Image (cartoon, grey):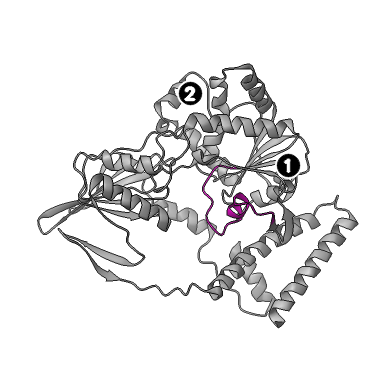
Amino acid sequence: MENEWKNRKRMRKGEKQIPPIYTAEEALHSLEIFEPVKYDEIVEITPEIHVRFNDAGHMLGSSIIELWVKEDGKETKTVFTGDIGNNDIPLLSEPTMIEETDYLVMESTYGSRLHIRNDEKAKMFLDIVSETLDNEGTVVIPSFAVGRTQEILYEINKLKDIIDDEEFKRKYKTLMKAAVYVDSPLAISATEVFRENMELFDEETQAQIMQGDNPLEFPGLQFTKTADESKALNEDNTPSIIISASGMCDVGRIKHHLKHNLWNPNSTILFVGYQAPGTLGYSIVNGAKKVKIFGEEIAVNARIEYIEGYSGHADQEGLMNFIYSFIKKPKHIFLVHGEEESKQVLQQKIDQETGIGTTIPEFGETYELNEQIQMTHKIERKVEKTIKTEVIERLEKLKLEIKDMDEYVRQDMDDKSLRDEDIFRINEKIKELEKQIINVIEG
């Protein structure tokens, strides 16, 4: 689709069309070379190299990988954690604890932080949602399509089992009366994958399913597949819950829901996942008073909430417990996949509590695993972090915004119920945007 958009632009310029990098058909054919592997099986890559995949408990199918390599008559084992899950993620089993390794390459996303516990987040979730619904507002939950969406559905279903007083019952009834929409084609597909692989759920969830209680199904749950169904959600003022991707709000249908709800003081935007700096979600969570969506400035009047406990990553305690679980401790640990502060705080914690040597490798570095860990090679990456870099990054982001704007304006133009004054207003906004672009070009 992106290639079609580029070719239309090239045609207008009289330039030759270019073929796509790959087609949808080729993408489907590529699946033929994928080979499914079960957890806990040792797989031979070559006679000298073997691997084993272990359940990482981060999302369905995520893996911690054990790697054995024989070289010069000596076997070395390295463990790559990938993303390590929380011990208390509903649906999923806990991360597999590994008994021994020579070297450990470990993530550090929450190396400097602790999550709130599970029982607290369930109560917070119910309080926030019921209060918003009582105020006749909509709860918009930006959520990653795989993992967090299914966890929220589980949480909503599970609330009925922890009712302990009349006020709690009242709030739960309020929640159960509301429609819950999953508005993301990918999240809908991912939910189906969860339903088809229930044998990977934790023991408690499997027992629940055996009793006839499917945690991914409950009254009021609806899936919106088409763009028209998605748009209709914002034309209905009935209080509801909308779970939509992307989790950081930069692309996808979530932007449309934010545009229609951010300005409304009765509505709530409930974040349940990490927001990376520079994303729209990060701006909203960190107190932005106004944001731009599809080129339009939107006031942030809605209630903004963030429940961190829904993170799919282990916190500092979980990461340390993973290290403690080794019967034969690693000789050395490499910390990757985290912001600088997280890696450095975790490095200090590991050093103080275990005495294991720790390295924070940089991009392009190669290390030789001998008695003394030594960097043997480094690929230099020249990135000039200046105002020039920021301009380029903003241009890239603006491209996506204009692409989104094009899609939604065209959808509006196809709407037979659109009034003349609405078309006039859209036209005036586009004219204003044209002037600003010309000013930048001429300036």
Residue displayed at 46% across by 42% down: 312
Q: Which residue is mark 1?
A: 233
Residue displayed at 21% across by 43% down: 100
Q: Is residue 216 visible?
A: no
Amino acid type for the residue under numbered disc 2: Ile
Q: Is residue 252 above or below residue 58?
A: below
Quarter in which the C terminus is drawn? bottom right
Determine the secondary structure under disc 2.
helix
Determine the secondary structure under disc 1.
helix
In the displayed structure image, the side of residue 251 where residue 70 appears, left or right: left
Disc sitting over residue 209 in the figure = 2
Residue displayed at 32% across by 51% down: 348
Q: Is residue 116 visible?
A: yes
Q: CA distance from mark 1 to mark 2?
A: 31 Å
- The answer to whether marks 1 and 2 mark residues whose Cβ atoms lie closer than 8 Å is no
Give the x, y percent position of residue 18.
Answer: 57, 73
Amino acid type for the residue under numbered disc 1: Leu
Q: Is residue 237 above or below residue 275?
A: above
| Main secondary structure along the magenta-highlighted residues | loop
Residue closest to the far bottom = 442
- Say whether residue 275 is magenta: yes
Q: Which residues are magenta?
A: 271-290
Q: Quadrant of residue 84?
A: top left
Give the x, y percent position of residue 53.
Answer: 31, 44
Nearest the viewer among 192 and 420 is 420
Nearest the viewer among 104 and 289 is 289
Q: Nearer the viewer, mark 1 or mark 2?
A: 1
